[in-house]
Structures are given as structure tokens and as C-alpha cells.
Amino acid sequence: MAHRQIAIDGPAASGKSTVAKLVAQRLGGFYINTGDMYRAVTRAVLDAGIDAENDPEAVVALLASIDLRYWLVDGVPVLHLDDAPVVQDSIRAPEVARVVSYVARIAGVRDWLRERQRETRALGTIVMEGRDIGTVILPDASHKFYVTASPLVRARRRLAQAGEVVDGATLASVAAEIAERDRIDSTRAVAPLRPAEDAIHIRSEEHTSELQSPNTI
Ligand code: DC
């Protein structure tokens, strides 16, 4: 069968990772998480002591000294920063969540990552999740989905995800943090978060059983 490209976009904690992983599993495709790529760059930026909000030039300059790529390990794409696999705990930390939107709005960062994201097409059938996959990265994707959920459901989910929120976080504080990230992601000048015109919209509330059967593909 011909290789397919599936684009899955949506805001933070919308449930798109769950959908994307299931679809990849069903299709025997490779799951690519572009949010992890932005988070890994952010980790490197924080480790280098750069202030991403106020010093985007330093962020872009840092890119020349790092390598970020998906490598196949036992047939599974694993994101590597330089020669080491990216550890989920290190990119899910609250300090990364706080800064990642500032990193993701820098045009030089998006240009740099775009090529690395498109490179994964060489793997075969890919299911790629992010914010601009259907609009910018894979405009010719065979299938495009835009996954959303209400702010309350998303905040609840985020709160339940260990490690992603600071100790003592409340539903209200998490909802506010998600809303701020959405605001930055959807109002930035380059590749803002928005559905592709030809995307199928999925509302992922509590109906996880529906997510078990992505039979639109
Ligand atoms: O999906 P996520 O929450 O892990 O994404 C982390 C951040 O990266 C989020 O603030 C938006 C940004 N991002 C983006 O701008 N474009 C993408 N394709 C993927 C993520």
C-alpha cells in the first residue's frame, strides 16, 4: 500500500497524542510528535541559560550547535538530541511548558524544525501531531484531523498528567496556563495554531471508547 501521511493538530492537552498513537498503531505507521521537538529545543535553550522570551536571536544561534532528529530504534522512531535519546521527564517538566510557546513563535526555530519534521516522511506511513502539520508541514497529507476538547476537560487532563504541572497546581491555575499557551500559539505571526481547511474536526471529551475506533480512515 502507498505510504500515507496523517496530520493531527490541536491545542494543548486536547487528546491528540492519544488519537495519533492509536491511529499509528492501527495503520502500522510511525508516530511523530512535533511538540516533543519544540520541547527538546526548549530544554536545550533552558540548559544553555538563554531567555527565550527576550532573546530569540540567542535561541536561533544555539540551533547551529545542536542536532535533533528521529532515529529508528528497534523499528520505533525515537527523538534524539545530539546522540542521546530525549528523556520524556526532561521535556515534560513545568519549566519547559512555561517557555515552549516563546521558543515555538520564533521563525528561525520553526524553519529549522520544519525540515527535520518533513524528513520523517522517508520512514514510510507517518502519523504526525502538532499545531501546524495540516497547514504548513504536510499540506498534502492524505488525512488531516483537528482535535479539540473544552478548556475544563483539557485542564483536568493536564492536572492528571504527573510531572507536567508544578506542585500545588489547581484546576484554575492549570486552565489559566493552558489558556495562555493557546493564546500565544494561536496568535503568533508564523504558522499559528489553526485547523487546515480540509481537516476533519474531532471533539475528544470523555468519550475515550470512541477514540478506540478511529474508523474515519
Ligand atoms: O503538543 P505540545 O503541548 O507538546 O507542544 C508544545 C509546544 O510546542 C506548544 O506550546 C506549541 C508548540 N508546537 C508548535 O508550535 N508547533 C507544533 N507543530 C507542535 C508544537
Image: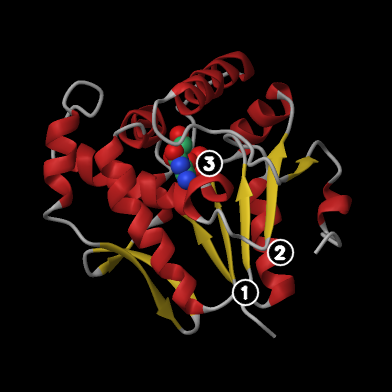
Picture quadrant of residue 146: top right
* Identity, as a three-letter code, of the amino acid under mark 3: Arg
Q: Amino acid at mark 2?
A: Val
In contact (CB < 8 Å): disc 2 and disc 1: yes
Q: Earlier in the sequence, mark 1 or mark 3?
A: 1
Q: Residues within 10 Å of mark 2 (few under 14, many from 20)?
A: many
User: Residue 128 location in percent, x, y?
Assistant: 56, 58
Q: Is residue 49 visible?
A: no
**Mark found first going from the N terminus, 2 or 1:** 2
Q: Which numbered disc covers residue 23? A: 2
Secondary structure under tag 2 reads helix
Q: Is residue 92 left or right of residue 209?
A: left
Say which element carries label 3.
loop
Earlier sequence position, callout 2 versus callout 3 = 2
Q: CA distance from mark 1 to mark 3?
A: 20 Å
Give coordinates of residue 127: x percent, y percent. Answer: 60, 63
Q: Vertical placement of 207 versus 5: above or below?
A: above
What is the distance, in whole Å, between disc 2 and disc 1 at their CAs? 8 Å
Residue drawn at 64 percent across, 37 percent down: 195
Task: Indicate the position of residue 101 as horizontal and vertical percent values.
Answer: 39, 30
Taking the image as shown, residue 191 lies to the left or right of residue 48, namely right
Determine which of the numbered discs, if any, sits on residue 131 in the image: 3
- Position of residue 113 relative to residue 191, above or below, is below
Q: CA distance from mark 2 to mark 3?
A: 17 Å
Q: Which quadrant, please, contains the N terminus?
A: bottom right
Q: Is residue 26 left or right of residue 62?
A: right
Q: Which mark is residue 29?
A: 1
- Residue 99, position as x, y percentages in the image: 34, 29
Image quarter where the C terminus lies is bottom right
130 above or below 103? below
Let me know if residue 189 appears in the view. yes
User: Secondary structure beneath disc 1?
Assistant: loop
